[in-house]
Image: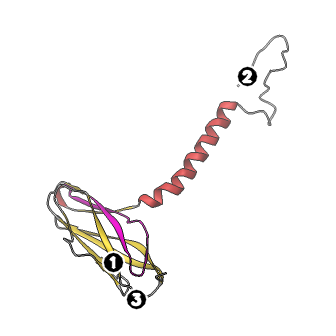
Amino acid sequence: MTFAISGATGDERHPQQPDHKEPEIMSLTRFAIACAAIALIVVPACRESVATGENGKKLAITKPVDQTIKAGDTNDIRIAIDRTNFVGNIEVDFDDLPSGIDLKDGSPEIPAGEDSKVYTLVADRDAKPVKDHRVKVTVQGGGLEISEFFMLTVEAAQ
């Protein structure tokens, strides 16, 4: 960029000076860095696993939020799915729950037309403390199956 200014005002910019940058470029650079930082924080929390099939069928599950439960308490966990090009119920299975942790009675399915369901984890009073236990959640429907994982921490009763 070249500037042709007659009459010195003290505000001339000289491209040959390496330490003199355009304010707009610096603002855009800061904005890009901020967006990248936000993406690093937000995107992993919204991870999704997808299974695809014939005729554009798709079944996706959003990674469940990691959970902490105290012995003797209950804790709700939301399982969210997205189905494309098929209708019907979605079966939900929780595998490898720690000893002393169960699901409250209820239908294990996400009904047709709905994209999520809240399940209640129940911890026995004598559930043993465990940190970051990996639990697998599998959803099935429309001839497709996909799994995601969340970490479950069980704390001692107080």
Secondary structure of the residue carrying numbered label 2: loop
Please give the range of residues in magenta.
56-81
147 is within the stretch colored magenta: no
Q: Position of residue 144 (x, y in %)?
A: 21, 67
The CA span between labels 3 and 1 is: 12 Å
For mark 1, what is the residue? 122
For mark 3, what is the residue? 126
Q: Are marks 3 and 2 in contact (CB under 8 Å)?
A: no
For mark 2, what is the residue? 2
Hey, what amino acid is under mark 2?
Thr
Q: Are marks 3 and 1 in contact (CB under 8 Å)?
A: no
Quadrant of the rendered image containing residue 64: bottom left
State the residue lying farthest toward the left. Answer: 88
Front residue of 153/4: it is 153
Q: Position of residue 108 (x, y in %)?
A: 21, 71
Tell how many labels: 3
Q: Main secondary structure of the magenta part?
A: strand
Circle 3: is it few (<14), some (14-19), or many (20+) Cα within 10 Å? few
Question: Which of the two labelled residues, at mark 2 and mark 1, occupies the earlier sequence position?
Answer: 2
68 is within the stretch colored magenta: yes
The residue sitting at 31% across, 80% down in the picture is: 102
The CA span between labels 2 and 1 is: 70 Å
- The answer to whether residue 41 is left or right of residue 150 is right
Circle 1: is it few (<14), some (14-19), or many (20+) Cα within 10 Å? many
Circle 2: is it few (<14), some (14-19), or many (20+) Cα within 10 Å? few
Hey, what amino acid is under mark 3?
Asp
Secondary structure of the residue carrying numbered label 1: strand
The CA span between labels 3 and 2 is: 76 Å
Question: Which of the two labelled residues, at mark 3 and mark 2, occupies the earlier sequence position?
Answer: 2
Q: Nearer the viewer, mark 3 or mark 2?
A: 3
Instruction: Check the image and report above or below for 49 versus 72.
Output: above
